[in-house]
Image (cartoon, rainbow, N blue to C red):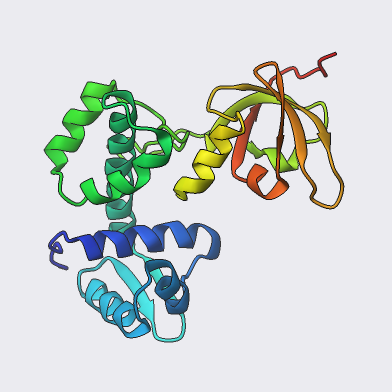
Amino acid sequence: MPKTPKRSESVDDFIKAVYSLQQENDRVSTNTLRDTLEITAPSVTDMAQRLVKDGLVDYQKYGGVILTPEGEAMAIKIIRRHRLIELYLVRELGYELYEVHGEAERLEHAVSERFVESLAGKLGDPEFDPHGDPIPTVDGTFAQRELLPLSALPPGAQGTVARLKGTNAEMIQHIIDRGFQLNSDICVLAKDPFDGPITARVDGEARVIGHQVAESIFVQLAETAEPQP
């Protein structure tokens, strides 16, 4: 039986990175992990081989890395920890949204599972973090929503800003400065061609955002969306 690995910042970061990357690519190449984690390729290989022994990853020399079920369970616990800390920082300590990712990255490695579950109780077992990302439950399930990026919506589409994707603090602050915040009512007014800027009415005020930035703004469409006058 694989032994339970000792928690460390490097193990947590590696497991979380593989989990995130495999959502799009199934098996994750060592080069992709090297670039994501900003470590050397030999360090990636060494960590992968260590975690194979712990039963957390399946590593193939020329086939990359994928998490085992045990590895996925560990990754989801790390994500739960991170997102609960982010929400606590915003709701209880008054942090700005652009500040919380980096702070949660530092704190998530230090807290115990008891602390995490106490935090969840304090916050009322929330479903979503302050970016709109789902917080996994204790049993590892995520709340499901059908969201679309603002960049994909046609003129006349209406809904609510439900998620701000990304960890780049400057990008998050730029989105907020342009008037796009969680739970804002939104209606697409116009889209310039060739991936040009998008004009939207946000909480009653016309706002303009670049197409690339709009890819990070996710909208939950209204059930009955008729164009506003």
Where residue 52 sits in the image (x, y, percent)?
26, 74
- Identify which residue, 70 or 177, lies in the foreground: 177
* Residue 50 placement, left or right of 150: left
* Residue 193 placement, left or right of 210: right
The quadrant of the rendering that contains the C terminus is: top right
Where residue 196 sits in the image (x, y, percent)?
80, 47
Where residue 101 sits in the image (x, y, percent)?
36, 45
Query: Quadrant of the rendered structure where residue 62 is?
Result: bottom left
Q: Which residue is pictured at 30% across the width and 52% down the height?
A: 73
Q: Residue furthest top?
A: 229
* Residue 118 placement, left or right of 131: left
- Identify which residue, 183 or 67, lies in the foreground: 183
Above-or-below relation of 99 to 159: below
* Residue 188 placement, left or right of 175: right
Above-or-below relation of 26 to 214: below
Q: Which residue is pictured at 28% across the width and 30% down the height?
A: 88
Q: Which residue is pictured at 74% across the width and 42% down the height?
A: 152
Above-or-below relation of 126 to 79: above
Q: Which residue is pictured at 13% across the width and 43% down the height?
A: 112
- The number of discs equals 0
Query: Quadrant of the rendered structure where residue 24 is?
Result: bottom right
Above-or-below relation of 15 to 198: below
Residue 211 in view in this figure: yes
